[in-house]
Image (cartoon, rainbow, N blue to C red):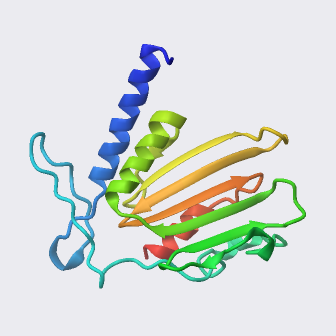
Amino acid sequence: MAPRATRAAAAAASVVCLAALVACAPDPGPAGTGAARSPTAAGSPAATPTPSVAGRAEIPDDCRAMLTPGVLSQLEGVPLNDPAFGSSGPQPGGGLICVWRDPAADTTGLITTITYMSRGPALDMLNQLVAEEGYACYTPVGGTRCEKTWQNETYPVTDGRTLFWRDDILIDTVYSNLAPSGYTDAVVASIFR
């Protein structure tokens, strides 16, 4: 059982993540300005705006096209979506899976899964990662980003996971010994222009 101070810290972190998602929900505002709204006052009903289908950001269907030349240069020589790793590329329902990994490599690789996910399930998942697994979250470019790194259990390399949620789109990247600088930022910029 976790000490009382640890449980209290996890609960506080969960509240911070919850506040971050509420604060970053888009304001339907005039002509779809997308301006961030401030949290509602205590006791007020929370508004949960839903982006209109016409104004909704779309998930790309090309793993390379959403990256900058600088990020692509860091992935040079790494195979993309090798059939050995199963279904990748565009997915039914509009998602995208990008697997940057050589089938001959023991651990080095990066997998990004981009899916549509509404605010409620995203909030629950991110809060769980904060409370139970110690992820750190912050709110860049109108969304919520949570991340964590750890030592690989078998090899002397760093593993990690980065998630970014905004406007009903979740970008979820799991990696091992392959973390190109600016990767998540490039994917986010490509989707939310």
Image quarter where the C terminus lies is bottom left
Rendered location of residue 28, percent (x, y): 19, 70
Q: Which residue is drawn at 47% across and 75% down?
A: 191
* Residue 90 visible in the snapshot: yes
Rendered location of residue 185, percent (x, y): 55, 63
The quadrant in which residue 175 appears is bottom right
Q: Given the current orientation, which residue lies at the most extreme right position?
A: 104
User: Is residue 168 toward the left or the right of residue 90 in the image?
Assistant: left
Q: Residue at x 37, y 43 (%)?
A: 17
The quadrant in which residue 166 appears is bottom left
User: Is residue 186 toward the left or the right of residue 85 in the image?
Assistant: left
Rendered location of residue 74, percent (x, y): 76, 66
Query: As displayed, is residue 72 above or below residue 25?
Result: below
Q: Which residue is drawn at 75% across and 68% down?
A: 85
Number of numbered discs: 0
User: Is residue 83 toward the left or the right of residue 7 in the image?
Assistant: right
Query: As displayed, is residue 16 above or below residue 107?
Result: above
Rendered location of residue 78, percent (x, y): 81, 70
* Residue 138 visible in the snapshot: no
User: Is residue 99 toward the left or the right of residue 117 in the image?
Assistant: right
Query: As displayed, is residue 87 above or below residue 154?
Result: below
Instruction: Name the one closer to the observer, 103 or 56.
Output: 103
Q: Residue at x 82, y 53 (%)?
A: 107
Q: Given the current orientation, which residue lies at the most extreme left position?
A: 44
Instruction: Name the one closer to the observer, 46 or 144.
Output: 46
Q: Given the current orientation, which residue lies at the most extreme bottom position?
A: 54
